[in-house]
């Protein structure tokens, strides 16, 4: 098993993200200084605390944890929606995995975002331009990566939208008129437009009807099998992670409390917090 | 008491003029870049050419000859009131002839007679930000310009191709200036965009309400944005011929004949048309452009 996964598509090292001024009490980084994830003296919230993990090539890594544990913040930092406070990240597809993608030029960051990563947002309003056709939404990343051939981009968008089951007669419509499930599917098509080696998925099915959830999850699974893309799959729902993730990281208050093979974590959780989480699901 | 005593020459005090000129100099130094300036109160409502007027008033000298046009017309109410203000505060001469003017202030058109070295074209701009349609925040668009990140401008054109089968911008089709900044050329028809390319005259653009000045210095490269398989095209003029002067290759207004209901065409640039009509009356017709 391990031999199959000896290359990491993404390596995150010592990632920190805090919101607030910090003070002498909390800037020491000591565990006892904080209440859950915030400092009672200065109110600084520590969304991520010295987080490190690897996403291997071709695998789905699940990230679970209760609301507020820092899951979305990881993806926000990786996709440059937010600046990390400290830490580094390396993509094997970028400069041989030797350059920290957080500390390169603004232009290089755009290249990474537009060609090496795809992201599906929990809230489709953040991931799509609602006033533009679905085709244009998918083509946006192609345009951003420098394509200036309209018919080629149109063909690619139509192919991808077809792949995520958007009927041809709706492809020129704006996603603002679509159901939640359809909007997520347009987001998935957009995220895949440049064949990115790494896909970031933030609560793809949260807020959807149960029957729709199953369809979207099937789609993600199918794409993973066909394209072998490495996926970082964030969810507060252990069921989603159980269905899709090879390995899982359990988060609490901005830190990893347990990590391992998904089956192992679900069947034999080691940490009290994980045990509680797994039992609450059963 | 005469008017010259009521106002400073060209309305503004010298300090204000210097400030506008400083913005103009910066704009010329960075072609296509929008320079913020402290837009003044004017005796004309904002949105009625106050941006262009402030540029004109800060540059005009006693020897200048000015032409003011509004969508091709020298005699529109708007053009006349701007002319009246300039002449009333400077006493300079006006002209309708684009070749004779040293400063041409215009709304929505570039004259048909090619502009020459030494002339200044001042265009009035309602919306200077070409990326506003895809990005509403000024902070964000400033960053996009700084990083030369113009996907948004292309996305807007791509969307038109997807929805209408072709780029359907009626006017204000975005241009890339000096291979660096994407710029709104002001709501001129696409027909006028190529006139900016390596234009011999200095082109200054002013947005009074949005408080921006930008420029295309003489001989600057100005390319209209397009796609490989949808190259930029001007409006089709096929079969159009001016009913008065016989011109063909100029921008036309469509005129519906009340009696027959048929469409006829007439030069949009009124003074261009008039000078051709005069020439035809005086000399043998040249056959219409
Ligand atoms: N922009 C922000 N400003 C202040 N606090 C924030 C901001 N974004 C997230 N947080 C805080 O960071 C913590 C982690 O948030 P988030 O990553 O969204 O959690 P999750 O996705 O696991 O629910 C939470 O306590 C949240 O309130
Ligand atoms: Mg979240
Ligand atoms: Zn503190």
Image (spheres, grey):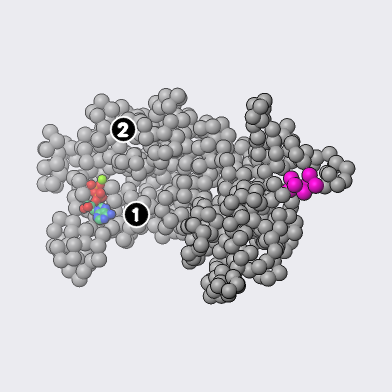
Horizontal relation, residue A140 to residue B114: left or right:
left
Residue on which the image places disc 1? A82
Reply above or below: A271 against B178.
above
Residue A73 included in the magenta stretch of the image: no
Horizontal relation, residue A34 to residue A123: left or right:
left
Question: Could you tell me if the residues under marks 1 and 2 are in contact, i.e. CB atoms within 8 Å?
Answer: no
Seen at 84% across and 39% down, the residue is B287
Span highlighted in magenta in the image: B272-278
- Kindly tell me whether mark 1's CB lies below 8 Å from ligand 1: yes
Q: Mark 2 belongs to which subunit?
A: A
Horizontal relation, residue B173 to residue A133: left or right:
right
| Residue A183 in picture, x, y percent from top left | 35, 34
Instruction: Please tell me whether mark 1 sits on a helix, a strand or a loop.
Output: loop
Q: In the picture, which quadrant includes the C terminus of chain A?
A: top left
Return the residue nearer the eye: A12 or B162: B162
Seen at 74% across and 45% down, the residue is B273
Locate residue A241: give its quadrant.
top left
Residue B274 included in the magenta stretch of the image: yes
Return the residue nearer the eye: A44 or B217: B217
Q: In the picture, which quadrant includes the N terminus of chain A?
A: top left
Residue on which the image places disc 2? A180
């Amino acid at each position: 098993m391990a031999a199959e996964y000896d290359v990491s598509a993404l390596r995150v090292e010592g990632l920190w993200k805090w919101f607030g001024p910090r003070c002498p009490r909390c800037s020491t980084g000591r565990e006892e200084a904080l209440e859950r994830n915030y400092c009672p003296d200065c109110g600084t919230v520590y969304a991520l605390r010295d987080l490190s993990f690897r996403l291997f090539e071709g695998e789905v890594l699940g990230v679970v944890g209760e609301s507020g544990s820092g899951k979305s913040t990881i993806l926000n930092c990786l996709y440059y929606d937010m600046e990390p406070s400290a830490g580094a990240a390396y993509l094997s597809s970028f400069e041989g995995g030797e350059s920290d993608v957080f500390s390169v030029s603004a232009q290089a960051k755009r290249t990474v975002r537009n060609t090496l990563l795809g992201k599906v947002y929990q809230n489709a309003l953040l991931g799509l331009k609602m006033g533009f056709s679905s085709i244009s939404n998918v083509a946006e990343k192609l345009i951003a990566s420098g394509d200036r051939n309209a018919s080629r981009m149109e063909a690619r968008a139509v192919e991808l939208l077809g792949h995520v089951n958007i009927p041809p007669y709706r492809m020129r419509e704006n996603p603002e008129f679509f159901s939640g499930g359809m909007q997520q599917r347009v987001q998935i098509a957009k995220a895949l437009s440049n064949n990115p080696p790494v896909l970031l998925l933030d609560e793809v099915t949260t807020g959807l009807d149960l029957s729709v959830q199953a369809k979207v999850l099937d789609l993600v699974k199918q794409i993973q099998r066909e394209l072998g893309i490495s996926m970082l799959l964030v969810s507060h729902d252990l069921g989603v992670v159980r269905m899709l993730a090879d390995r899982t990281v359990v988060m609490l208050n901005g830190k990893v409390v347990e990590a391992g093979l998904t089956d192992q974590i679900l069947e034999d959780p080691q940490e009290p917090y994980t045990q509680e989480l797994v039992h609450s699901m059963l | 008491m005469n008017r010259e005593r009521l106002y400073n020459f060209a309305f503004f005090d010298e300090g204000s003029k210097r400030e506008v000129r400083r913005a103009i100099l910066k704009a010329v130094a960075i072609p296509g870049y929008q320079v913020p300036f402290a837009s003044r109160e004017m005796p004309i409502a904002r949105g009625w050419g106050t941006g262009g007027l402030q540029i004109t008033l800060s540059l005009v000298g006693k020897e200048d000859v000015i032409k003011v046009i509004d969508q091709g017309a020298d005699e529109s109410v708007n053009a006349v009131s701007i002319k009246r203000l300039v002449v009333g505060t400077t006493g300079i001469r006006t002209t309708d002839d684009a070749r004779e003017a040293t400063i041409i202030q215009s709304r929505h058109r570039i004259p048909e007679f090619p502009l020459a070295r030494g002339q200044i074209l001042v265009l009035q701009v309602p919306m200077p930000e070409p990326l506003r349609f895809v990005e509403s925040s000024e902070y964000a668009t400033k960053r996009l310009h700084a990083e030369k990140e113009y996907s948004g401008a292309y996305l807007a054109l791509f969307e038109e191709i997807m929805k209408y089968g072709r780029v359907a911008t009626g006017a204000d089709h975005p241009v890339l200036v000096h291979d660096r900044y994407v710029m709104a050329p002001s709501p001129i028809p696409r027909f006028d965009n190529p006139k900016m390319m390596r234009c011999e005259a200095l082109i200054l653009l002013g947005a009074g309400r949005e408080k921006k000045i930008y420029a295309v210095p003489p001989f600057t490269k100005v390319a209209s944005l397009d796609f490989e398989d949808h190259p930029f095209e001007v409006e089709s003029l096929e079969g159009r011929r001016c009913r008065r002067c016989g011109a063909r290759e100029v921008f036309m207004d469509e005129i519906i004949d009340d009696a027959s209901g048929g469409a006829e065409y007439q030069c949009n640039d009124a003074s261009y048309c008039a000078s051709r009509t005069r020439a035809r009356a005086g000399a043998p017709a040249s056959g219409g452009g």
